[in-house]
Amino acid sequence: MEKIFDREKIASCIAKSRYHAVLDSLALDFYLIKYEKGELVISPFQNELLFQIVEHGSINIYFIRDDGTRYSLSNGTTDYFLGDMEIFYPKSNNIYAEAAENLTCISFSIEKNREILLSNNKFLELICNSLSAKIGTMTAIDAAPASLTERVISYMRYKCEHETLKGIEQAAFHLHCSARQLQRILNQSEAAGLVRKLGKGTYRLL
């Protein structure tokens, strides 16, 4: 991730945005953020709440349940909003956005500017349209089919601190499988070079 504060570059991106009139009316401290392909744009591990508008590139947004099941929520390209829900609701611990390619976003802090955002009717109109479209999309989603191996990998990547699974019995409970099944998957994943055993019942994702 790279933050860019060059005023000319920021002004150029805002001028090209379909929302430039509303953004100009907000008079906020905007900056740009560049993400590389595969980098997480939104995750529960981030501390700062940001509102971001995709200026270039595309993203995949998905929901990870505690058992590692992955739901695809949406795909976003130029002019897509990130952070619109966070203006009104606490941050979700299960929603992720990942750069599907190199990505540039127009960004600003939600917390520092919440009062300005909530008092701007044109901005709120954009947010209502965005949220309505997202709700419409989510009514049709279902869990992506996933094997137990895929769910174990997702569980380690998104639910385990430092991508390290500790405790076979506890993890098996969350994954809705037996400890024997989970141990077999971990053994196979270790042989395939996907995980490394660090100790008894402890495995780290590679």
Image: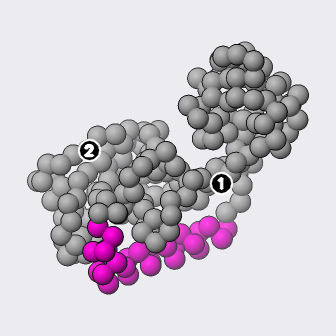
Give 85 or 7, whichever is nearer the viewer. Answer: 85
Q: Which mark is residue 3?
A: 2
Question: Pointer 1: what residue?
Answer: 71
- Choose top left, top right, bottom left or bottom right for residue 102: top left
- Asked if residue 53 can be seen in this view, the reply is no
Q: Position of residue 28 (x, y in %)?
A: 21, 65
Q: Secondary structure at mark 2?
A: strand
- Amino acid carrying mark 2 in the image: Lys
Q: Quadrant of the N terminus?
A: top left
- Choose top left, top right, bottom left or bottom right for residue 135: bottom right
Residue under the point 36% across and 42% down: 35
Q: Is 133 contained in the magenta span?
A: yes
Task: Determine the main secondary structure of the stretch shown in magenta.
Answer: helix
Using a 10 Å C-alpha cutoff, classify the residue at mark 1 as few (fewer than 14 neighbours), some (14 to 19) or many (20 or more): some
- Vertical order, 182 against 48 (above or below): above
Q: Which mark is residue 32?
A: none
- Asked if residue 1 can be seen in this view, the reply is yes
- Vertical order, 184 against 49 (above or below): above
Magenta region: which residues?
A: 113-140
Q: Position of residue 4 (x, y in %)?
A: 21, 46
- Amino acid carrying mark 1 in the image: Tyr
